[in-house]
Each structure stands twice: as structure tokens, then as C-alpha cells.
Image (spheres, rainbow, N blue to C red):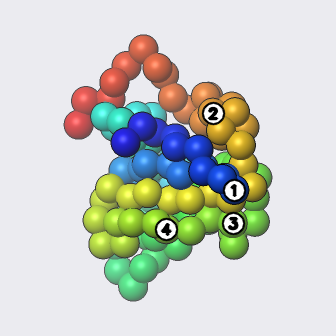
């Protein structure tokens, strides 16, 4: 799966989370996924909630517009962001992603 996949009402984004990080934020690429560092531990859905909140803020949409499609208990996840075009999503991610690197796992 590519990093971004356009959908009828938004985009799906492939991410790889790193829980229990010193700070939260987008940290570049991890293969064909966006690497997201999270302060939260993967306990009681805290990391998933923080991930959705972080991406909602990044894309400038309400938290309710971000939903987990797959990967609830995995580090590799697919999230759907409604109300965002592929071009807007690429523009929002561009400062965090250096396309000259592939992000070695």
C-alpha cells in the first residue's frame, strides 16, 4: 500500500507507530508508511486515540473525521481521514517526509 490512498470522501494513510516515545509527532517514512511517534503506551487504546488526535490536528480536521481502518493492536495501521483531498494530504505531510530516503526499518 502507498502512503496515501485516495477515497471517495477523503484519504487513507498507512502509518507505523512507535509508542512510548519521548515526544509525539510525525518522524518521516518507514518503508511505504509514515512513521508516527507517540508518547502514549499501547494500553487501553491510548496510543490509537493519541494517533487519531495527532493526525486530526496535522490535517486540520475534527477528531471525529479520523478513524482507524485496520491495525488496532498492531504497530502498522491504516487510518481514514475524511474531508481531505489527496493534494491537501500530500501538502500537509510534505514538511515531514523526505522523499529522497526510503526510511529503513
Q: How crowded is mark 2: few (under 14 residues within 10 Å), some or many (20 or more)?
A: some
Which quadrant holds residue 57?
bottom right
Front residue (pair 11, 76): 11
Tell me the CA gap for discs 1 and 3: 10 Å
Q: Residues within 10 Å of mark 3 (few under 14, many from 20)?
A: some
Which quadrant holds residue 32?
top left
View extreme (left): residue: 105
Q: Is residue 100 above or below residue 10?
A: above
Tell me the CA gap for discs 2 and 1: 16 Å
Front residue (pair 19, 69): 69
Q: Which of marks 1 and 4 is nearer the N terminus?
A: 1
Q: Please name the residue shown 55% across and 32% down the image.
A: 96
For mark 2, what is the residue? Answer: 90
The kind of secondary structure element at disc 4 is strand
Q: Earlier in the sequence, mark 2 or mark 3?
A: 3
Q: Please name the residue shown 39% across and 85% down the image.
A: 44
Q: Residue 9 bears which disc, if any?
A: 1
Q: Please name the residue shown 52% across and 43% down the image.
A: 5
Q: Residues within 10 Å of mark 1 (few under 14, many from 20)?
A: few
User: Residue 26, percent across and down?
Assistant: 51, 44
Tell me the CA gap for discs 2 and 3: 17 Å
Horizontal side, residue 64 vs residue 72: left or right: right
Nearer to us of marks 1 and 4 is 1
User: Residue 45, percent across and down?
Assistant: 42, 79
Tell me the CA gap for discs 1 and 4: 15 Å
Q: Residue 68 bears which disc, if any?
A: 4
Q: Which of marks 2 and 4 is nearer the N terminus?
A: 4
Front residue (pair 5, 103): 5
Give the quadrant of the C terminus: top left
The kind of secondary structure element at disc 3 is helix
For mark 3, what is the residue? Answer: 65
Amino acid at each position: 500500500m502507498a502512503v496515501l490512498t485516495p477515497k471517495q470522501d477523503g484519504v487513507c494513510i498507512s502509518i507505523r507507530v512507535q509508542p512510548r516515545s519521548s515526544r509525539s509527532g510525525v518522524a518521516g517514512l518507514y518503508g511505504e508508511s509514515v512513521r508516527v511517534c507517540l508518547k502514549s503506551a499501547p494500553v487501553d487504546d491510548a496510543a490509537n486515540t493519541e494517533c487519531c488526535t495527532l493526525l486530526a490536528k496535522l490535517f486540520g480536521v475534527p477528531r471525529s473525521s479520523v478513524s482507524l481502518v485496520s491495525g488496532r493492536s498492531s504497530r502498522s495501521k491504516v487510518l481514514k481521514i475524511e474531508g481531505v483531498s489527496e493534494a491537501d494530504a500530500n501538502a500537509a505531510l510534505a514538511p515531514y517526509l523526505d522523499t529522497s530516503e526510503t526510511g529503513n526499518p
